[in-house]
Every structure is written in C-alpha cells, then in structure tokens.
Image (tube, helix red, strand yellow):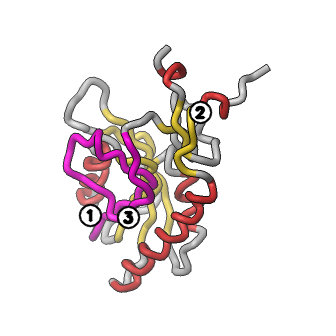
Amino acid sequence: MAKIISEDIDHVLFTEEQIEQRCKELAQEIEKDYEERHIQPLVVGLLKGSVPFMAELIKYFKHPIEIDFISVSSYQGTQSGDVRINKDLDLSSRDKNVLIVEDIVDTGRTLKEVKQLFYNKGAKDVKVVALLDKPDRRLVNIKADFLGFTIPDEFVVGYGLDYNQCYRNLPYIGVLKNEIYNQ
C-alpha cells in the first residue's frame, strides 16, 4: 500500500483557506497596479511549482490577461544562477508587460536570471508575484513586487512545492519532517 503523503508533514504553515484568501487579495493588488497603468499583463507561470498558485490567482482577475508558461532550470555546478530554458513561451513577450508567477523566492538566483531573460526578449516591463518568500536564504538582491507570505528557513512543500517531485498536490503549505529529506 502506498504511503499517505500528509503523514510526512511536521506542521502546516498556511491552510488552503488562507492561501485562497491571500490569492484574492493579491489579485486585487495586481489588477489595481496594471489598471492604473492601463495595461494588460502577460501572466507567465514558472513550471512546475507555480501551477496551483497561478490557477488560484488568475480566477480572481476581472480584466483580460494572457497566460503562458516557461520552464527553466539552473545549470548544474555553477554559482552564477545561469538558467537553461527547458520549455519556452508559446507567445512572444516582446513589448509586453510580463508578470512572472513564482511559487517561492529562495536564493533569488534563478528568478533574477529569468527576469533578465524577459527584458532580453524585449519585454516592456517585468514584475513578479510569488506565493512565498524565504529571505533568510537570499543570495542575490531581488524581491517580488507582489507577495503572498514570508516564511522562515524551513523545508516547505505542498501547493505546487515539491521534494523529489512529490507533495505538490497537497492543498496547503506544510513543513516537511526532517527525517524525510535527511535520509
């Protein structure tokens, strides 16, 4: 019999209801910002972790948006944060106002590179909305323009965040038990 993944959670940081409420608030903040500037964003989810967050967030937008996805990974063995594009956008970001949807801002290296990538591709403006921010692990100076929650330096999973590609489907953000990832 397969194990029940919720048994690997030490404690819940944010419930499904708390995340849903924060997504409603974030959608209002984001729409106000874009509405004041009279622009329509291209909302780009960073695969795979951002999918549940992006799906919840865009439900509350009242104005037109375009959506797309990009998948990137950091080059192995580098300290620079260089990224490799695994799946590029289907749409062009040239002359667009891009809103990157990220599950968590951790070291900041990949996000900084992805943001620059969009500018290199001709985007007019690039902003970031992140569900979680873990500032204690930051190695580069970058922060989200719109933020769900700030968290301590703990190993979190759920709501798109994974450990070895598992736990993404938990409907909440939880702290993984130490013995799971320290085996």
In reply to whether residue 141 is colored magenta, the answer given is: yes
Residue position marked by numbered label 3 in the rendering: 146
Please determine whether, in this image, residue 137 is positioned above or below residue 142. Answer: above
Identify which amino acid the numbered label 1 is placed on: Gly
Measured as percent of width and height from the top left, residue 100 is found at 39, 59
Q: How crowded is mark 2: few (under 14 residues within 10 Å), some or many (20 or more)?
A: some
In reply to whether residue 48 is colored magenta, the answer given is: no
Q: Nearer the viewer, mark 1 or mark 2?
A: 2
| Helix, strand or loop at mark 1 | loop
| Helix, strand or loop at mark 3 | strand
The image quadrant of residue 78 is top left
Instruction: Pick whichever, 14 or 113, lies toward us.
Output: 14
Identify which amino acid the numbered label 3 is placed on: Phe
Taking the spot 35% from the left edge, 70% from the top edge, the residue there is: 96
Q: Nearer the viewer, mark 3 or mark 1?
A: 3
First along the sequence among labels 3 and 2: 2
Residue position marked by numbered label 2 in the rendering: 9
Q: Left of 59 or right of it: where is 2?
A: right
| Helix, strand or loop at mark 2 | strand
First along the sequence among labels 3 and 1: 1
Identify which amino acid the numbered label 2 is placed on: Ile
Residue 65 is marked as: none
Q: Which of marks 3 and 2 is in front?
A: 2
Query: Range of the magenta residues?
Result: 124-152
Task: Measure how far apart labels 3 and 2 are at the Cα level.
Answer: 27 Å
Please determine whether, in this image, residue 130 is positioned above or below residue 127. Answer: above
**Labels 3 and 2 touching (C-beta < 8 A):** no
First along the sequence among labels 1 and 2: 2
Measured as percent of width and height from the top left, residue 89 is found at 44, 54
